[in-house]
Image: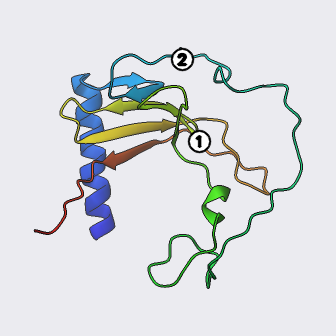
Amino acid sequence: MRRALIFGVGAAFLVATAAAGESDERHGLSTFGELKYAADFAHFDYVEPDAPKGGALRMWALESYDSLNPFVLKGVPAAGVGLIYETLMTGADDEADAMYGLIAESAALAPDGSSVIFTLLGYLRVPNTQRTLSPVLVLVPAIRLTMPA
């Protein structure tokens, strides 16, 4: 019941936002003004697209771990295990506060800044299968972190 209620509220927000035409879909988000790269950029300026690919990544850490799950609430996840996941957006190293879509095709920020709607790329593939993910909208509410007084 709770899932249905949350889905219903999210769906109502998506329909209301789309109907009002208030959200501005962009290929990236920036706090400090305009983005450096256009929507159709192939790679960042500091990336060499012809660099050799392949190889192995070996990492070490001083601490121990007891889980390969980086999302555990108890225990210590292995160092670097979060590197196996892709994020919705990625930052550019030559811009102060810009985020560009990685697996998100576009992002629409609500006018009041309370939420972001991401549209996922249509050609995403589920690993080790031939299934592709259909483009979907992901509603992400803004989370405010507060420190106790």
Count of picture labels = 2
Q: Distance between the residues labelled 2 and 1?
A: 21 Å
Residue at image mark 2? 39
Q: Tell me which amino acid carries mark 2.
A: Ala
At x 38%, y 16%, the residue is 34
- How dense is the environment of label 2, judged by Cα within 10 Å: few (below 14), some, or many (20 and up)? some
Dot 2: element: loop
Q: Tell me which amino acid carries mark 1.
A: Ser
Residue 135 lies, with reference to residue 49, above or below; the image says: below
| Residue 35 coordinates in the image, percent (x, y) | 44, 18
**Of residues 73 and 15, the one drawn nearer to the viewer in this rendering:** 73
Residue 81 lies, with reference to residue 78, above or below; the image says: above
Residue at image mark 1? 134
**Of residues 111 and 65, the one drawn nearer to the viewer in this rendering:** 65
| Residue 98 coordinates in the image, percent (x, y) | 44, 29
Q: Which of marks 2 and 1 is nearer the N terminus?
A: 2
Residue 20 lies, with reference to residue 137, above or below; the image says: above
- How dense is the environment of label 1, judged by Cα within 10 Å: few (below 14), some, or many (20 and up)? few
Q: In which quarter of the image is the N terminus?
A: bottom left
At x 67%, y 36%, the residue is 123
Residue 134 lies, with reference to residue 69, above or below; the image says: above
Asked if the residue at tag 1 contacts the one at tag 2, i.e. Cβ–Cβ closer than 8 Å, the answer is no
| Residue 43 coordinates in the image, percent (x, y) | 67, 23
| Residue 48 coordinates in the image, percent (x, y) | 77, 25
At x 62%, y 45%, the residue is 133
